[in-house]
Image (cartoon, rainbow, N blue to C red):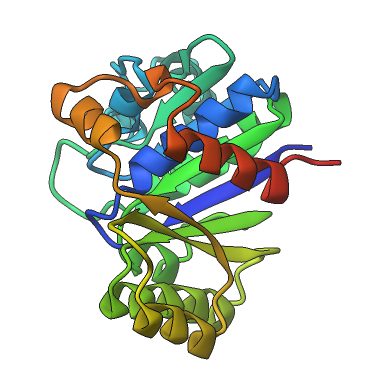
């Protein structure tokens, strides 16, 4: 049975990069096969992982009226989803993508959730990079998960946002076994006010990732996160995080 990890957080915190680092660590530890799910309409997890996507769930939604004669809608969608699955070395990727036409993304989210649940039977781990913010949870399109990782910066506002995400998960009674926070791109020591706010909110601080010039350079040049060297400090911290929270004993 797959171990589900749901990534969450506000935009601009490096959530997708952290998701890529988690996939990298699991691959290094021999935990494949892994299914990476880009559930953000503005998908870029493929760039972090160094693969190309040509089909998305959003595109499939737009083309549902073109079901071939003699084929049911469910069979056609299932066939198209299999086509959309990008196969790589040790992991596969599927992307929700942005629907080309007007209207709500809700049905594309529903399709993504349904077929990820089906595909998950073939994988040891499923890493879901959700869209930023809270809307996807209020629409109940976030999967239940073994672990939710909320990525934020070290500001008090960022910690407050992380606590709101945690509280909303509780209010919606989402089936999430554990919720932890990762502080990303931290410069210098963590400020006492930030640490105090984390303690006050009752959030579980899993790890602190320092601002890293190599990761910034990779992002700016479009180099996949998977190619980061093993001795990179952030890579080592994520390896420890994966060992503690994700490697099933």
- Position of 159 with respect to 247 (left or right) is left
Q: Residue at x 35, y 39 (%)?
A: 17
State which quarter of the image contains the C terminus.
Answer: top right
Image quadrant assignment for residue 183: bottom left
- Position of 85 with respect to 62 (left or right) is right
Q: Residue furthest front?
A: 189
Q: Nearer the viewer, residue 174 or 20?
A: 20
Q: Residue at x 25, y 19 (%)?
A: 223
Q: Residue furthest bottom?
A: 200
On the question of residue 145 being in view, the answer is: no
Q: Horizontal and vertical percent for residue 239?
A: 59, 37
Q: Is residue 192 above or below residue 10?
A: below
Q: Is residue 39 above or below residue 83?
A: below
On the question of residue 138 being in view, the answer is: yes
Q: Is residue 82 above or below residue 202?
A: above
State which quarter of the image contains the N terminus.
Answer: top right
Numbered-mark total: 0
Q: Residue furthest right?
A: 249
Q: Horizontal and vertical percent for residue 159?
A: 37, 76
Q: Residue at x 31, y 59 (%)?
A: 188
Q: Residue at x 41, y 67 (%)?
A: 139
- Position of 102 with respect to 242 (left or right) is left
- Position of 68 with respect to 207 (left or right) is left
Q: Horizontal and vertical percent for residue 14?
A: 30, 48
Q: Horizontal and vertical percent for residue 36?
A: 50, 31
Q: Nearer the viewer, residue 163 or 52?
A: 163
Q: Is residue 203 above or below residue 140?
A: below
Q: Nearer the viewer, residue 167 or 200?
A: 200
């Amino acid at each position: 049975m797959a171990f589900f990890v749901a990534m969450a957080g506000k935009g601009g915190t490096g959530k997708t990069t952290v998701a890529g680092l988690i996939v990298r660590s699991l691959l290094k530890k021999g935990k494949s096969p892994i299914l990476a799910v880009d559930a953000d309409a503005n998908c870029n997890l493929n760039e972090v992982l160094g693969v190309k996507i040509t089909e998305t769930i959003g595109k499939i939604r737009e083309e549902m009226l073109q079901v071939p004669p003699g084929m049911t809608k469910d069979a056609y969608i299932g066939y198209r989803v299999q086509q959309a699955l990008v196969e790589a070395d040790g992991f596969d990727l599927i992307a929700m993508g942005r629907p080309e036409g007007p209207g709500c993304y809700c049905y594309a989210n529903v399709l993504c959730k349904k077929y990820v649940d089906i595909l998950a039977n073939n994988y040891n781990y499923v890493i879901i990079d959700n869209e930023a913010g809270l809307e996807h949870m209020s629409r109940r399109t976030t999967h239940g998960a073994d672990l939710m990782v909320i990525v934020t910066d070290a500001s008090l506002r960022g910690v407050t946002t992380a606590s709101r995400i945690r509280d909303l998960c509780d209010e919606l009674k989402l089936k999430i076994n554990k919720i932890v926070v990762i502080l990303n791109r931290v410069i210098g020591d963590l400020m006492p006010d930030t640490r105090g706010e984390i303690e006050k909110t009752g959030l579980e601080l899993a790890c602190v990732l320092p601002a890293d010039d190599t990761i910034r350079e990779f992002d700016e040049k479009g180099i996949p996160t998977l190619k980061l060297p093993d001795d990179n400090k952030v890579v080592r911290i994520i390896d420890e995080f994966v060992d503690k929270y994700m490697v099933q004993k």
